Amino acid sequence: MTPSPAWKPAAARRVVAEATARLDDARLLLSADAPLRDRVRDAYGATREVRIRGELRAVPVEALAEVRPRLRVSVLEKAGFHTVTQVLVAGTERLTAAGIGDGTARQAVAAARTLEEQADRDLRFRIDVDPDDPYATVLVQALYAFRVSTAARYRWFDLAQRLVDGLPPHLDAAGLAASRLRRLFAPASRRSESFAAVSALAAVLGEDAVPDGGRAPATVADAGTAGLAASAREVRSAVGQPPEAADVWADFERRSAEYYGLLSQVVDLGDDHEAAEGGLPADVVRRVEAQPLDRSLLRASLRGYQVFGARYALVQRRTILGDEMGLGKTMQSIATMAHLTATTEGPAHHLVVCPASVVTNWAREVEQHSALPAVVMHGADRDDAAARWAAEGGVGVTTFEVLGRLPFDPALRPALLVVDEAHYVKNPETIRGRTVRAWSDRAERVLFLSGTPMENKVAEFKAMVGYLQPEVARQLDAQAGLSGAKAFRRIVAPVYLRRNQEDVLTELPGLVQVEEWEQFGPADGAAYRAAVEAGNFMAMRRAAFDVADADDSAKLRRLRELVEEAVANGRRVIVFSYFLTVLEQVMGVLGEQAVGPLTGSVPVPERQAMVDRLAEPDGPRVLVSQITAGGVGLNVQAASVVIFCEPQVKPTIEAQAVARAHRMGQTRTVQVHRLLVERSVDQRMMEILGSKAALFEEFARQSEISDTSSAAVDVAEPSLARTILAEEQERLGREAVAAAR
């Protein structure tokens, strides 16, 4: 055995110090979530109790007699106790001190607690954004710290465990080498053992080169342990000094779904577990629940129904996830891919096939919510990207049209094939259908995604099931009206899982906001470049719609898809734009589905008539409106999907428009979709205005917004226009020069 080289005391001290610090970091990351769970649980309990007491504050003491008919309520009222909450707060002791008999006091408190328990059972808990609510703020701060801790634990679990297991056995022995005095009097064998212990510490920390007895390294941590240390600092900061109320509420608004997901991990939010299971038979549910889900590569928290969906995809292998729009089918797909990658040796290949309009969204979602690399195989460099994906693995994202043209080795077998908007391949005889069929046959697992309800389209549904599990498809009678039948559910249980928003999101009505990022094609891209060259800021903003054929506009194609899916799910839609020409394009695309356009030239009574038509059972499903006209003053609770065709220069106007649908009386989650184009005026506006998003969303909860509030958060349009125009002219100029070389 080769003896370990000698270590200078200074070098050894730095290794020991680094090892001690990283051991503390690792232990923190492995253990911090337990006390933070308790903190969340306590904050939730306090917030819930305040909510319940607040409700009971409006309940008169007469209600106690409904629980205890012989209770002398008049005695309570004469003593100054008029509400159930007052009785609860007082308790038996204070009631008797106020002159109420002991028996009456005990009965009153018992009855009040019964009503409290009933209110607790009936309460559907939601976190309403209110920085002035101290209880809700403490809860959100606790969830923030829990989020930071959970994310760090998932990310660094393996390394932290390696440090916890590998460092302690060597720390004591290494201390000798770090002390000049101790090593002076120690026998040679002890010094040799100590030097070996220091080398072992350095190896565990990731330092391959052992010092030769000369200079001490500045650090022995590799990139991994340095990242772990940074995460530990973030956790300590979040635990010891949570962000200010405004900052933590802003974070909550940006990622409220994740906060609710974390909360559901700690407390029972009253989720309908049967609904989360999609009404599947008990035998299927048992198999799914037994499937572990490795979340080490995820960077997001999942709701319970999302965990079930990912497990279902893993267990059943070839399935359709038909969750209603807004429930996170993309997130469940990413969780499935992350599990397969984490549990596979070597590179794992996953393939996502989707409409061109959502390619960018898929790549963004994968890289934002997981540690998986996304490779976009679309556009001029698609062949190079395909070669990179084939060699390195990750999540390859391509379109139905490009899929059949990519040069792949037939031996390449994706671990998971995801087909988004799977109803695009309802006809297996088309070129698109045959291409997807070929890839389905070679993939180890297949997951079709479609938010469009399919029970009423049995023939189409049967064709889609045929790609996945032909034996199930053969059991379906394409001519039968099987919608909602138990027999239908049992037959398709091995292949089809669908949940609805109202069944699984207990905090409804809520607000779900989605950025729909697209890329310019030849026609809309040319219109945009022309607008930039002309120095016309307003033309730049509407250029994505400045096409002769609607199919040449990436935004119009995505808008049409969003409307079709919303309508299929029984939802009504409001489409907002600032520009009259854009509204005309939208009306042309939607045809008889839409009413409008509602513009500034439409008299106010006629505006309300348009809204009323939208609410009619057999009326149009979409209201097309100029945002400056329909974004204020109207109540449009009939609509639960809002689509913005472009970012607004005054974000308060956008917030007011959302508030038309997201207000008291709304019974469905409001989905807000913003149509955006990468590398354009849209992206720059979002970046510049994004820092004020929390204020804008706060305004969305108000029925009216004052001019003063508006001025406080809006960005001056001339300044914004000049800044973005100059930047875009410079960028396109650079790209033109680069292309000419």
Image: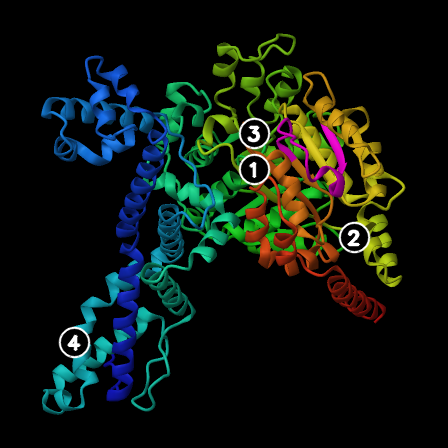
**Residue that mark 2 sits on:** 541
Q: Position of residue 236 (x, y in %)?
A: 33, 63
Residue 736, relative to residue 290: is it above or below?
below
Look at 39% across and 44% down and name the residue there.
262
Residue 64 appears in which quarter of the rendering? top left
* Mark 1 lies on residue: 443
Task: Give the residue displayed 55% in from the left and 34% down from the top.
Answer: 446
Q: Which residue is mark 3?
A: 666
Does the magenta segment cover residue 162? Answer: no
Residue type highlighted by circle 2? Arg
For label 1, the crowd category at 10 Å Cα-Cα, with few meaning under 14, some 14 to 19 and many 20 or more, is many
CA gap, disc 2 to disc 3?
Answer: 31 Å
Alpha-carbon distance for marks 1 and 2? 42 Å
Q: Which residues fall within the magenta stretch?
A: 622-641
Please state which amino acid type lies under the numbered disc 1. Answer: Ala
Q: Nearer the viewer, residue 674 or 5?
A: 674
Return the disc, 3 or 1, that comes first in the chain's sequence: 1
Q: Residue furthest front?
A: 78
Question: With respect to residue 339, does 525 lie above or below?
Answer: below
* Mark 1 element type: loop
First-in-chain label (2 vs 3): 2
Q: Secondary structure at mark 2?
A: helix
Residue 630 lies, in percent from the top left, at 73, 37
Task: Say what amino acid the circle numbered 3 marks.
Answer: Gln
Question: Residues under labels 3 and 1: Cα distance?
Answer: 43 Å
